[in-house]
Image (tube, rainbow, N blue to C red):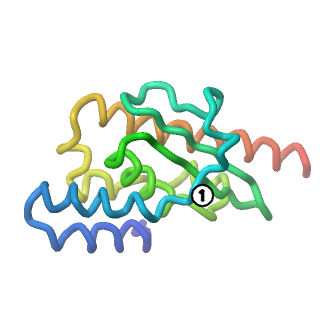
Amino acid sequence: MKDKIQEEIIEEFSVFDDWLDRYDYLISLSDSLPAIAPEHRTESYLIQGCQSRVWIDAELRDGRVWFTADSDAIITKGIIALLIRVLNGRTPREILDTELYFIDAIGLGANLSPTRANGLLAMVKQMRLYALAYESKLEQNH
């Protein structure tokens, strides 16, 4: 199933022929990252498996998950901004069921260093873990 937001991202990246331009664009996206609360820039919100320091928080409001994040590495901030753009405001089930095909479609998977690629997987995993936790919380409340 085509995902409107992922299609937009693929379209945006398709205008760049070369990876350096895509990296620049990725870096510019870091400005759109929803800021994480300072009290959540702690060890317990830190993603394990990332070379750079990445903090992700999630909040459940009206049955939908909203993410905030930060990183000390600008390219990583751009990557997490894309993930949040795709997954923000979805139900926990939608997050768990969303195939993040834009990652390969824009060449991100192929052009990241192995450590960054591992970090990307760790960020996705953490976001899905939040969704899983919120889904079970919702089920308990019904």
Residue 85, position in %: x, y? Answer: 48, 63
Three-letter code, disc 1: Glu
Residue in the image at 46% along x and 42% along y: 71
Element assignment for label 1: helix
In the rendered view, does 41 fall on the left or right side of 76? right
Image-quadrant location for residue 65: bottom right
Residue 129, position in %: x, y? Answer: 61, 37
Residue 7, position in %: x, y? Answer: 35, 71
**Mark 1 Cα-neighbour bin, 10 Å: few <14, some 14–19, many ≥20:** some
**Identity of the residue furthest to the right in this view:** 141
Residue in the image at 49% along x and 59% along y: 33
Number of marks in picture: 1
Mark 1 — residue?
A: 94
In front of the other: 38 or 132: 38
Residue in the image at 44% along x and 50% along y: 80
Image-quadrant location for residue 23: bottom left
Residue 136, position in %: x, y? Answer: 77, 41
In front of the other: 37 or 11: 37
In the rendered view, does 139 fall on the left or right side of 38? right
In the rendered view, does 127 fall on the left or right side of 20? right
In the rendered image, the vertical position of residue 131 relative to residue 105, given as above or below = above
In the rendered image, the vertical position of residue 20 relative to residue 136, given as above or below = below
